[in-house]
Amino acid sequence: MYDVLIIGSGAGGGPLALRFSQAGAKVLVLERGPRLQRNDFPEDEVENSMPGFWYPRVADDPHVVISQNNPKPQPSNFGWIATCVGGGTVHMGGFLYRFHPDDFRMRSRFGAYASLADWPYSYDELEPYYVQAEWEVGVSGEPEPSHLGIPRSRDYPMPPLASHPITPAFDRACKDLGLHPFATPRSINSQWYQGRPPCSYCNLCAGFGCRTGAKGSSLEAFIPRAEATGNCTVVPNAMAFEVTVDHRGRATGCRYFDALGQERRARARVVCVCCSAVESARLLLISKSPLFPDGLANGNGLVGRHLQFHAVTTASGQFELKGLDPAVWKHRHPFLGRSLLDHYFLPPEVSSLPKGGVLRFGIPQLQPVALAQRVAESGGLTRWGAPLQRALREYFLEIRTVEFEVFHDYVPNEDTYMELDPQVTNKWGLPAARIYRRPDPHHYTAGLWLQSRGLEVLKAMGAKELKRGALGETAAFLVHGTCRAGHDPETSTLNSYCQTHEVSNLFVVDGSFMPTSGGAAPTLTIIANSFRTADHILARAGQGAWG
C-alpha cells in the first residue's frame, strides 16, 4: 500500500512525485511509456520524427477526430503529447511563461462569451507556486516588463540564455514601434544548476530530447530527485486502464498492464491522475463501476467536456545577407529568444473577445530535412530538380530567416469535447478517445491581427520578404480542460485543489483542470498548480485525512 499513486510523470505528475517524496510519503509513479536516457535521444531529425517514438502509433492507440471540416471519424495521433517518463516536458521547447492575472478571471472580465469561466482561485494564490516551479525546474530569463501587470515576488534563478548577435537589431526595431521585448523564459540551464550542465546550444531543441541534460524536464528536474529520497518508485511501460474504488466510492488504486502485457494492481491512499487532458478523461470514463456507471467522478456528465487545445499563429521574415554585416548575420547561434506581451489584449474593435497572446520570436532550428521540405513547398509551389537546388542554395547561403509564433487562447465551447469512441479500440481492447473539434472564429480573427503585428516588427528590422504562416490553427500538443475546476459541483468536475467533487481521495492534476487555456504556453502553470495541489494533499494528510 502506497500513500500516493501518480498515473503519469509529466508536468502534472512530476512535481507531485517530488513534493510527496521529499515530505516522506511513499509514492508510486506509473508511466505508460519507456524511460529514456540522454543518449537515447536521436541526433537525427528523421529518427526523432518516426511514428511511435514520442507517442503511440495510430494503429496501436489512435485518437479519433471529428472536426467541423471533416465530419467523418479520422483515426490520428491528434491530441497526443509524449508517452515516456517525463511526458511532453522531455521534448518541449521549454517556453515557460506565467499567465496574466486576467487569465484567471476571463468570464468576469469578458462576460458570457462561448463557455468562458473564471478559475476557482486567483493569480495571487498561484504566484508563490509560480516561484517554486521556476526554481525547481530551473528557468533562465528576465522578468516581464513591469507595466504589463504580471506581478512577481522573485526573479528567475538563472540569467537568460545567450542569444544571436541580431538580437540588438530586433530590440531596436521593437522599441521604435513602442514595444517592450524581453528574454524568453526557458526551462534550459544558462549555467550549471541542480547538478545539470548548461545548454550546449545545439540545433536539436524544441521537439527533441536534450542529450546534454540542460532542459528542465520532469525526467531531469523532478523524477531523479524524487527517487533519491528513497520514497519514490517509478514503473515505466505501465498502461493504467482502470482507477479502482471500494464499496464506499473511495479510490483504492488502479489496474494496469505491465511491460509484458500482464495485468497488475496498485493500491494507494490517494490517487492522482496526470495523463494529459485527453488521456486523463479517457481513464476516468473507462473506469466504470456500479457506483459510477457513467465513468468515475462523472455524475454530472462533464468529464471530457470543455476540451481545449491552444490556438497558434505563425509567420516569418527573410533577410538578404548581401550588404549585411557578415559577423552578425552569418552567425549560426540557434537562439534569438525574444518575446512580446504588448498584444496580450486586443483593441476592442478587432474581435468580440478582446484577448490576444504572446509573440515568441526565434530562428528556425537548423534541420536540413525539415527546412528543405519547407523550401520545396513554399509559395504554393512544389519545386523539383534544378529549381529546388537554386532555392535551397538561396535559403541556406544567401538569406537568414527570423520567425515567430503566437500563443493565443483556444476558446472553450460546447462543441469541442471528447468521449469514448463507440467502435474504435486500442491494442489493449480499450475504447479510443473520440475528439470533437469546432474552433471558435475568434482564433482566426485574433490570429490575423496578431500576425500582422509581428510582421511589422520584422519589416522594421529590414526583412525583404514577409511570409504569413499558420493562422489561428490548433496546437494539438497543448491540451486542457476536460475536468474543469470550479466551486460548483454541478458545473465542474474538480474543486480548486484538483480534487474530484465525487471522490475525495481522487485528484486530476494536469491540464485537465484548466477552465480556460490562457494566452501563453501553459506548462509552467500546470507545474505550479501541481505544487499547490501537493501542498493541499500533504496538509490534509498531516491532519490524518489522505484526500
Image: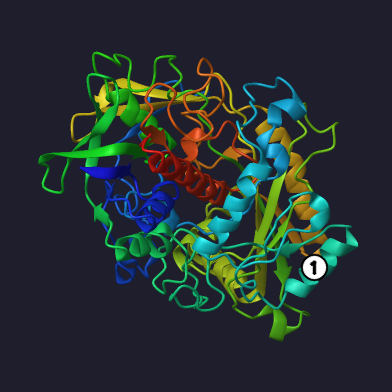
Which residue is depicted at the point 38% across and 27% down?
Answer: 504
Res. 169 image quadrant: bottom right
- Residue furthest front as drawn: 543
Q: Is residue 521 left or right of residue 447?
A: left
Residue under the point 54% across and 35% down:
514
* Quadrant location of the N terminus in the rendered image: top left
Residue drawn at x 40%, y 43% is: 542
- Is residue 59 in view from this perspective? no
Residue 477 pos. (x, y %): 47, 44
Answer yes or no: is residue 170 visible.
yes
Left or right: where 408 falls relative to 139: right
Q: Tell me what residue is drawn at x 63 percent, y 40 percent.
A: 518
Q: Tag 1: residue type?
A: Asp
Q: Nearer the viewer, residue 537 or 104?
A: 537
Q: Residues within 10 Å of mark 1 (few under 14, many from 20)?
A: some
Q: Quadrant of the C terminus?
A: top left
203, 343: nearer the viewer:
343
Coordinates of residue 539 in the picture (x, y in percent): 45, 43
Q: Which residue, given by chain and number where applicable, does mark 1 sit on?
A: 171
Compared to residue 290, the image places residue 36 above or below, namely: below
Q: Quadrant of residue 163?
A: bottom right
State the image coordinates of residue 41 (x, y, percent, origin top left): 34, 66
Instruction: Report whether 496 appears left or right of 542.
Output: right
Query: Quick check: 348 above or below 202?
Result: above
Residue 422 image offset from top left, x and y in percent: 29, 18
* Secondary element at image label 1: helix
Q: Is residue 275 above or below residue 47?
A: above
| Of 107 and 252, the residue lying toward us | 252
